[in-house]
Image (tube, rainbow, N blue to C red):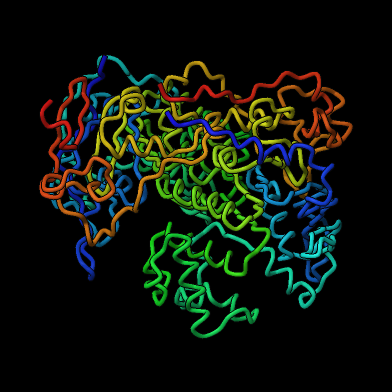
Amino acid sequence: MSAQQTNGSQRSTSANGSAAADNVLLDVKNLQKWFPITAGFFRRTIGHVKAVDDISFQVLQGETVGLVGESGCGKTTAGRCILRAYDLTGGQILFQDHDGKMVDLGPLNNNEMKPYRQQVRMIFQDPFNSLNPRMPVIDIVGDPLKINNVAAGKELEDRVASLLARVGLRPEYMRRYPHAFSGGERQRIGIARALALDPRLVVADEAVSALDVSVRAQILNLIKDLQEEFNLTYLFVSHDLSVIEYICDRVVVMYVGKIVEVAETEELFAQPFHPYTEALLSAVPNPDPRMRQQKSRIVLEGDVADPANPPSGCYFHPRCRYVQDQCSLETPELREIAPGHYAACHFAEELTLTGVTASGELG
Amino acid sequence: MDTPVLIEIKNLKTHFFLDEGTVQAVNGVDFTIHQHKTLCVVGESGCGKSVTARSILQIVDQPGRIVEGEILYHRPDRLSGVGLSEGLPSSNGADGSSSTEIIDLAALDPRGREIREIRGQDISMIFQEPMTSLSPIHTVGNQITEAIKLHTDMLDDEADEHAIELLRRVGIPRPAERLDTYPFELSGGMRQRVMIAMALSCNPALLIADEPTTAVDVTTQAQILELLEELQDDFGMAIMLITHDLGVVAEMADDVVVMYLGQVAERGDVESIFHDPKHPYTQALLKSIPRLGVSRTLQRLDSIRGMVPDPYNRPTGCMFGPRCDHFMPGRCDAINPPAIQLGDGREVHCLLYEDE
């Protein structure tokens, strides 16, 4: 149907993640974010929601890492911690500065954060709530430039115009307000705003989830093109596995605040090592009616565990098809099962799990 | 093969009269829903799929109203007067029930007694967002038994009993205790199950599901879709499933209606829509979705250029014309393509197929 082009060269750099240390743009180490649960008149803390509980992963220069999981798994919280929209409970966020030194963003205060806020930017999910309805586009996109004294006056206008043109909007529309634009166009404005300061890392939190099918493809292509043009690195947070597969080089799968599997996209989808990943992959509806009978969908029992009161041992064990006694007693560590492929399951080697093969192709 | 017709929609037009102008949300839609079958209505936001569904139940929000067309409901026999006392699940006379009564729902008064009798009993609906469509200040039990008591002559105890049975049927653990919980105590998936239990409480002939899985996770979506399939086997109702997710359509549908900007672009059985799409919009839509297992080898996704036009500035002629790759100047912008029958129940609204 379409020419198969390999982008192997781009991907091979990310294969041995930890080895190429100077290539690491972001190194998240043992990141924790707990939200207190308070009760009573004195707002006493009676427990914690462990939204993100001890996760570690790396993002290399120029790659796209997907953070995938169901709602409540902590993927958004992790993204926001990296942006330092939240204060951390524990752990480190090491970010490579322009001079190649790794800086821990964790303990920095607002003033100290400022230079890094130019380098780490965000694209939001909801194109309707993330744009101020009382600001014209020129202010929405231009304000980061103004605040950081990058440009002003006529120059600012030119910069905004070129940014808008780059994301596929007409520069003449820069005096308009967000309500005059459709969902896809607003998302383009949000992308232009994120790119205004030439960031090095962009956290895209469900950037295409709110968009319609035909527009989603446009935005995904745009995100990919911009990466090549501006040498961007993405942390792509999403629940949609087919989008993750299309856009990401490597994928981090999360479940109830913990990482259950990390691998290169191709490997993860073809040969998952964690039962949760397998179930997640099998739950995605296949857009081919002929596959209906052949596919044995794994339907998970019950709901995602409560992060305030997680089950013992492996958090996934109450819903796991392959559960054994050990699972409810010991918490599995994230281990390297195959080169560059990590999974947190006691039986990762023994289980033969099914991934997704290229069978969904249209005839 | 085909089961008897349940709902027949003919040239339905539902317009919204706003200060800025008239929005022709649904503009001449025809399709049929068969008994015990699943019909999926697919399209992007603003294509009128939800308004079509709401028109069937006459719950179109103000200032919208049905201005033209017919919605013929072929009321199956078993619903006229049969109580639910025998309990459930029953196959409710799935076979051999010939329709006797034909009611034009579009002609009924939206506030009238007749349509209120049909809502919840003959035709019921589940909505996208289970949190906002359940009442936060009434218990689950209260909300389910309300419909039962309204449409049947069951007593309080019997209605409670029936509600527990329904909750058990939709897979809610410890249903007797759940009767006294409030919606906020339940997870998203559980709330959607409560909605389904409520919708099925009176054994409807048609269940309209408006994006029932859009707000839930993939694993929950798999659970809900599986449940709907099971319930359809048990209760024998027809399902009209409204979605924008082509994956869901492929898994659930018997028949598919593809809508674009208030009109039907194409309709047919699921197999031919996915494997032999005729309308350029359907073809483009199918190409633009990332597919698991395939998309990782693709460098770019095919996308449809432009965007859905503004409802106040609808194009002339074919609605899809300005975004279509097969646009024929002078024809597509002049003629609104009529329905062209391609045999086997397939119908396409595109001038490309005029000669056939």
Residue nearest the observer in this picture, B250 or A363: A363
Which of the 4 image quarters holds residue A171?
bottom left
Q: How many marks?
A: 0
Residue A155 placement, left or right of B87: right
Query: What residue sits 40% from the left and 24% below the top?
Result: B235
Residue B70 placement, left or right of A356: left
Quarter of the picture containing the N terminus of chain A is top left
Query: What residue sits 25% from the left and 46% below the top?
Result: B320
What x and y, as percent, mark residue A198? 62, 66
Quarter of the picture containing the C terminus of chain A is top left
Residue nearest the observer in this picture, B77 or A353: A353
What x and y, as percent, mark residue B226? 51, 27
Query: What residue sits 30% from the left and 29% below the top?
Result: B277
Asked if residue B18 can be seen in this view, the reply is yes
Residue A78 placement, left or right of A143: right
What x and y, as percent, mark residue B254? 34, 24
What x and y, as percent, mark residue A70? 63, 43
Residue nearest the observer in this picture, B168 or A262: A262
Query: What residue sits 32% from the left and 18% below the top?
Result: B94
